[in-house]
Amino acid sequence: MSDPAGGVLFGLPARGVLWLVALAAITVFLRRVIGCARLLARARPEARWDRIPARLKRFAWEVLLQRKLLEEPVIGAAHLLIFWAFVFYAASFFWNLARGLLPFLPIPYADQAPWMAVALEVFGLLGLIALAAAAIRRYLFPPPRLEQTLDAGLILVLIAVVLLSSLVGAGAAGLTHGERGGWHWIADLAATALGSTGLERSQAARLNIAMWWVHMITVLGFLAYIPYSKHLHLLASPFGVLFGSLKPPMPAASEGADRLEEFTWRQLFSGLACAECGRCDRACPALNSGFPLSPKMLMHQVKELVRASLTTAADARGLLGERVKPEQIWACMTCLACIQRCPVSNEHIPVLVELRRRLMAQGALEARLQEALTNLARYGNSFGQSARNRPKWTQPLEFRIKDARKEPVSWLWFTGDYASYDPRLQPVTRAAARLFQRAGLDFGILYEAEQNSGNDARRAGEEGLFEALMEKNLAAFAKARFERIVTGDPHSLHALKHEYRWPNGPVAVLHYSELLCQLIRAGKLPLAKRLSGAVTYHDPCYLGRYNGIYAAPREVLRALGLRLIEMPRHGSRSYCCGAGGGRIWMEDVPGIRERPAESRVREAAATGAGLLAVSCPKDLIMFQDALKTTGLEAKLVVKDISQLVEEAMIP
């Protein structure tokens, strides 16, 4: 190929045209990008520069290898091919742009380097096939909540033009100079196709140059267009993954947020990185139950907040009100499914918690939630009962549980509110106590000194109450002598393990399913019989997605002799019971289709197992209620894992 920028274009020096168009496109691009950066700089600071090796590892898995997208194999593979085609063609573009603008550089054009030419041919063809698959999926077989906007279609067309112009240009070059053979079979095939149209070599040479210009002008137009479109995520999402939270995110203490400056830069960046693919919506139990919350639209509104501030000196509207309604904010169950499924590591829950904090400060919360929070502040539990009643569940036991404040223990059992106060759960709590006793475990409890862990209060937006409960519990822990903590409540597990500020460093905290698994392995819980039949298991959100504990409960069930049948949504894709984020204290909104717990017990019953095993007190309550409302009481039984272990120990 002769120098395509060295001739005349539209009667003007071609290189001058290239300089003019490139400067215009880059100026438009940088103006928008710099504007976004300045807006993010106005937001609250948030440190995301720690643990660089871990961040780079996740970047490799989720950006370079597209691991999350490959969970849907067909479209994931297509997206992976489009991504790598984008990478090679972007490299080729900047290479050609530098060579075209600066002819004195001692380098060839990109397609004159054999290795790059082959890569462009291969990824051009594979990219076109992947684009066709993506278009068919988007417009003929779209999954729920996938956008079908003109913007989305335009991007597919632009990418197709970029790839086709390169392949046609390679074919024209092959027709001009003769087939090259070897790895260039794609270009040779294109040359043969062009030759069959009667195209002469001189015409092919002109076509080659024309395709070079089509390619360059399209990419420069693409460059200028991206920051102003929904496809800003093409630029932002890699950084979203790199600077995403390495643990379940929780915003630092604040007075809440509504306007742009009140959010952190990373919370706003989630809106810019959002691809609006709908994966978060498809996983959201609130949206799928008929609640008004859409995680995708929340991110869209964050993006609109930023974009509005770019076009006006100051956007008078925050997120609350016209953009996001209170009923949407209170619908979230903080189950983490949206964040876990998001391929660009967007963080929906911190934004919702900030909004809840602002509503909480305004007193804009429903009566039942207010009552629960008042009880937590006054009594240390959401039931509004005296602290003296907390250890009453121990009274029917034939042995006394140690008071860890008065005598040292190896294990401090943090029982939690529901396991202590709810009459439906107290038999389960006593079953666990008997298991610990029979295993010879040296354990104790805090009796009336234990307070609610504060996890759900914090997610409901009551940060000050969480701090108060944490300080009271830490004061009680300081008076006790213990080595490790065990709890049956995944919500308490997460707070104690990850969010409490332990004065002398982190304390080992285990879920009781992990401890039971260890005791069975060690032979300290000899099983008198093997249970028969099939069981299905529900992964609690705060045990699974928040803490990655999936294997221990399943190992316990298998050790009991039960045949485990997994529900379609299990493990990291488990469906929420609907209790988290303080929702267990709130009324259901009118018009919902079906509560998450009802959907979940239907899914469990459909496995044919007949037994649903749980490892969270809230799950047991939610699912037992759901069995009644769905009429499945004769088809499905819900039991806690500790109850099943105790059954296997009785001859």
Image (spheres, helix red, strand yellow):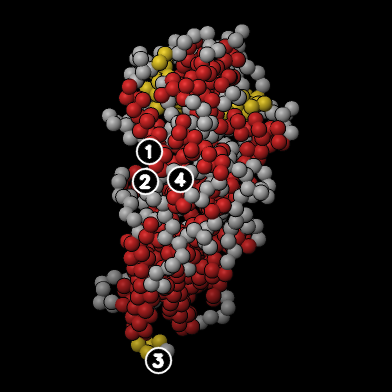
C-alpha span from label 4 to label 2: 10 Å
**For residue 259, side relative to residue 428 (left or right):** left
**Where is residue 210 shown, x and y percent of the image?**
45, 80
Q: Is residue 258 visible?
A: yes
Labels 2, 3: front one: 2
Q: Relative to 120, is 608 above or below?
A: above
**Where is residue 108 shown, x and y percent of the image?**
32, 71
> Regarding mark 3 in the picture, which secondary structure is present there?
loop
Looking at the image, tell me whether mark 2 or mark 1 is earlier in sequence order: 2
Residue at 47% over, 48% down: 360
Residue at 35% over, 72% down: 31
- Would you name the residue on which mark 1 appears? 467
Determine whether label 2 and label 1 are within 8 Å by CB. yes
Q: Amino acid at mark 3?
A: Gly
Residue 11's tag is: 3
Determine whether label 4 and label 1 are within 8 Å by CB. no
Q: Amino acid at mark 1?
A: Glu
Mark 2: give few (<14), some (14-19) or many (20+) Cα within 10 Å. some
The quarter of the displayed image where residue 431 is located: top right
- Would you name the residue on which mark 4 appears? 461
Q: Amino acid at mark 2?
A: Ala
Residue 253's tag is: 2
Which one is in front, 403 or 215?
403
C-alpha span from label 2 to label 3: 63 Å
Labels 1, 3: front one: 1
> Regarding mark 4 in the picture, which secondary structure is present there?
loop
Q: Relative to 378, is 518 above or below?
A: above
C-alpha span from label 4 to label 1: 12 Å
Mark 1: give few (<14), some (14-19) or many (20+) Cα within 10 Å. some
**Where is residue 233 shown, x and y percent of the image?**
45, 61
Q: Relative to 548, is 11 above or below?
A: below
